[in-house]
Image: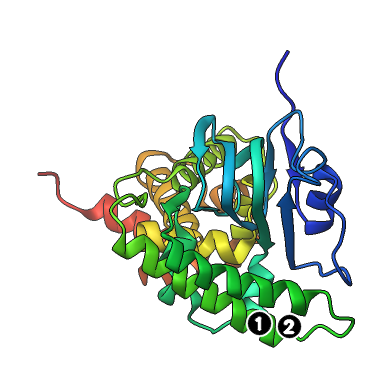
């Protein structure tokens, strides 16, 4: 029997999934949970892997845990930091924890409460893989002090989200330093992007259905993001970061390419081609094609017919 993959969209769902109690007023975009000997048998216990639409930082002060990430097992040690980005399959098994911290935040949290160029400052947030590093005792104390401040602020009745955002930025600065300076940090520079690969496959499937006359729903970048259970903004940033082009640019390029093939290699009427790609009418299709190529579909087809044979 195939294992069911739970899709967790919100932090409320992750709390319910793992049985994590809320510390202070509920926040939909940020949470922090301390794990110790008193609660480790109750928390982070789930039978099946899940897929989440948010960032996770798992910091182990003392203890051991196993993390399942995209069907890979990672054995986490004491004094380690483990980061995962949205959209991947994951689960945890706690072997023995004396002290650890489980922090989650959303794309919405970063965009609302952190600096505007957050992904330029911390490119590992667009990593298509996990990030893992062992932390020395001095740096761990700095990280722990920052976490203690976060815990204190998140428990307040009137949470200052800008202040919490600043604290998260400081934590990311320290983590970034650790990833850059320590030889035992994991880097994904040579890892192929599964997000990009799946996007390409989804494009192939979508345009295959169009050309077969199945008339699927007209898809936008947001739909391709939803297919991978990713926030649209985060998905678009990742595709642009990995390929140099936005998802919308890829979609338009594919539409244009398929249309050109039909105009070149078939005698299908131009109105039918426009209808195949679900343009509202022939004028809309002609206007779109001219904007992309400076020629109308009719003039493009005529220009090919007038070209001399080589």
- Which mark is in front, 2 or 1? 2
Above or below residue 95? Residue 134 is: below
Q: Is residue 221 visible in the rendered structure shown here?
A: yes
- Residue drawn where x is 59% and y is 43% of the image: 63
- Residue drawn where x is 85% and y is 80% of the image: 156
The tag earlier along the polypeptide, 2 or 1, is 1
Q: Crowding near pointer 2: few (<14 within 10 Å), some, many (20+)?
A: some
Which residue does the numbered mark 2 point to in the structure image? 161
- Residue drawn where x is 31% and y is 52% of the image: 189
Which mark is drawn over residue 113? 1
Q: Crowding near pointer 1: few (<14 within 10 Å), some, many (20+)?
A: some
- Residue drawn where x is 73% and y is 57% of the image: 34
Query: Looking at the image, which is closer to me, 26 or 155?
Result: 155
Where residue 241 appears, as percent x and y from the top left, is: 40, 63
Element class at badge 1: helix
Q: Which quarter of the rendering shows the N terminus?
A: top right
Where residue 201 appears, as percent x and y from the top left, is: 49, 38
Where residue 81 appears, as percent x and y from the top left, is: 51, 54
Query: Looking at the image, which is closer to me, 74 or 147?
Result: 147
Where residue 18 appears, as percent x and y from the top left, is: 80, 44
Above or below residue 179? Residue 36 is: above
Q: Is residue 304 left or right of residue 98?
A: left
Which mark is drawn over residue 191? none
Q: CA distance from mark 2 to mark 1?
A: 6 Å
Above or below residue 150? Residue 203 is: above
Count the marks.
2
Circles 2 and 1: CB distance less than 8 Å? Answer: yes
Element class at badge 2: helix
Q: Is residue 149 left or right of residue 160?
A: left
């Amino acid at each position: 029997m195939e294992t069911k993959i739970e899709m967790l969209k919100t932090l409320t769902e992750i709390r319910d999934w793992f049985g994590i109690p809320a510390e202070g007023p509920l926040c939909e975009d940020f949470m922090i949970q301390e794990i110790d000997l008193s609660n480790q048998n109750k928390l982070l216990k789930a039978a099946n892997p899940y897929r989440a639409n948010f960032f996770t930082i798992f910091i182990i002060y003392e203890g051991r845990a196993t993390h399942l990430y995209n069907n890979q097992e990672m054995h986490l040690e004491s004094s380690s930091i483990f980061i995962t980005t949205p959209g991947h399959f994951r689960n945890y098994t706690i072997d023995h924890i004396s002290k650890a911290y489980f922090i989650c935040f959303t794309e919405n949290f970063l965009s609302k409460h952190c600096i505007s160029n957050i992904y330029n400052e911390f490119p590992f947030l667009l990593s298509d893989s996990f990030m893992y590093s062992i932390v020395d005792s001095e740096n761990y104390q700095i990280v722990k002090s920052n976490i203690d401040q976060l815990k204190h602020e998140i428990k307040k009745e009137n949470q200052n989200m800008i202040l919490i955002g600043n604290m998260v930025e400081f934590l990311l600065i320290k983590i970034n330093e650790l990833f850059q300076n320590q030889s035992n940090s994991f880097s994904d520079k040579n890892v192929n992007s599964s997000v990009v690969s799946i996007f390409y496959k989804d494009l192939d499937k979508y345009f295959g259905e169009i050309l077969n006359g199945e008339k699927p729903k007209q898809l936008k970048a947001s739909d391709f993001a939803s297919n991978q259970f990713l926030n649209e903004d985060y998905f678009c940033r990742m595709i642009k970061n990995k390929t140099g082009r936005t998802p919308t640019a890829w979609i338009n390029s594919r539409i244009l390419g398929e249309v050109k093939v039909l105009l070149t290699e078939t005698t299908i009427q131009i109105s039918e081609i426009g209808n195949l790609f679900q343009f509202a009418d022939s004028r809309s299709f002609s206007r779109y094609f001219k904007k992309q190529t400076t020629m109308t579909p009719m003039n493009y087809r005529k220009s090919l017919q007038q070209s001399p044979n080589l």
